[in-house]
Image (cartoon, rainbow, N blue to C red):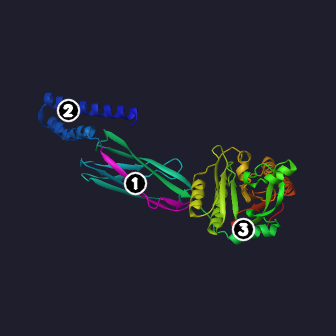
Amino acid sequence: MSKWLKIKRFFSFAGVLILLAAAFAYAMFQGGFVSWFLFYSFLPFALYLVLLFIYPVNFTAERTVSPRTYIAGDDIEVNVTLTRRFPFPLLFLVVEDVRPDSLKHKEIKQMFFPGFKKKLKMTYTIRKVSRGEHIFQNVRLKTGDALGLLEKEKWIPCKQAILVYPPYEDISYKSIRNLFDQGGIVSPLSSHDPSLVAGIREYEPGDRFSWIDWKASARSNEMMTKEFDRRESDDFLIVLDTMPTKTFEFLVKFAASVARAIIRNGGKIGILLGGKESLFIPPSTGEGQLQAIFYQLAKVSEDRLPSEENLFENQKIVRKSAVILIITSKLTKKMIDMSERLPGNNNQIIFFYIKGEGESTEKMELKAAAVRKGLIIQSIEHDLQMAFAGVKQA
């Protein structure tokens, strides 16, 4: 409770005592039926005010939400239960479940007339909840007397988090595979098979220590590593651009849809989120991986740190992924240059570019330059299925 509310309550209580003393003095000096009638009529209100001032409003609150994970756009039913031990007669009680700032919803209030009741229950529904982690902290109670002379307020800690996952659409995994076939990419989903040695070559930064061919290195007086045949793999990495944009929620939805489609079909996928607090989840498979990616996509927010900075800082782990899917709505020259410099991935990087209304000549030139450098640009609008309907070269 704030200091101002405490001062206000004290002056209200003092004012009641002054009124009671004035009514008593008036009855004593004036005498007669009317003066004493006024005093005795006000006395019950004054006594109730004194008791209400002392009463600690000893409620405890419990909030229940089941299930605790939702998809953006769902309706959420919330139950708040208030209980107390001492049944002090309250004329009214305003209950407010204080909504978090992340939740775009009107105030959640309800009035009760509890009397001597020990248990109260408030039920409300949050319509079309937005994506994110919404943390409820407090339940606010407000009561007072019939004359409005005294108000009491109490904040009850009642912390609970509601996780709302991003929406997604069902995308055919076959269409994702067809993307590479139609684009003419040679074996983009591949990885080294250590059981099949195809030859030797000079050592390159990033090669494993176990790949070094010591005999060949001794003969040539240079570090040489074994070169392996490549086998088919389903390793993907999503790089989500978190720069502020009107289409940010659509970017998150697209990332969630792709991750779900790949994992549900046995593929491996990881995610790299941009921003000041960048986060990297290495490619893996299974329902646990999907839950981890969805959890981060539920909490991700816009950030002004460009994603190309994260690509630069994490290039050693990024380049190990078979296919990198960069999801963005702001194609920049710096991002294209950074992608080109990632070792060994020039023909395994795909830009999924969310088109805006009326693309500028500069953007079209950037796309053409990216294609000339061997990168793939996929322009998408509102139909996620069409994002994998062939490779667009500009």
Quote the CA–CA distance across marks 1 and 2.
46 Å
Image x and y of residue 36, in percent = 14, 36
How busy is the neighbourhood of tag 3: few (under 14 within 10 Å), some, or many (20 plus)? some
How busy is the neighbourhood of tag 2: few (under 14 within 10 Å), some, or many (20 plus)? many
Q: Are marks 1 and 2 in contact (CB under 8 Å)?
A: no
Where is the N terminus found, in terms of image quarters? top left
Task: Read off the residue under disc 3.
Answer: 176
Q: Nearer the viewer, mark 1 or mark 2?
A: 1
Describe residue 290's horizontal placement relative to residue 306 as left or right: left
Quote the CA–CA distance across marks 2 and 3.
85 Å
Residue depicted at 24% across the width and 32% down the height: 17
Task: Read off the residue under disc 2.
Answer: 23
Q: Secondary structure at mark 1?
A: strand
Q: Secondary structure at mark 2?
A: helix
From what the image shows, is residue 28 above or below residue 222?
above
Residue 223 shows in this picture:
yes
Where does the magenta region start and end? 57-78
Judge whether residue 69 is colored magenta: yes
Depth check: give the residue in front, 216 or 10. Answer: 216
Q: What is the quadrant of residue 10 in the picture? A: top left
Task: Read off the residue under disc 1.
Answer: 63
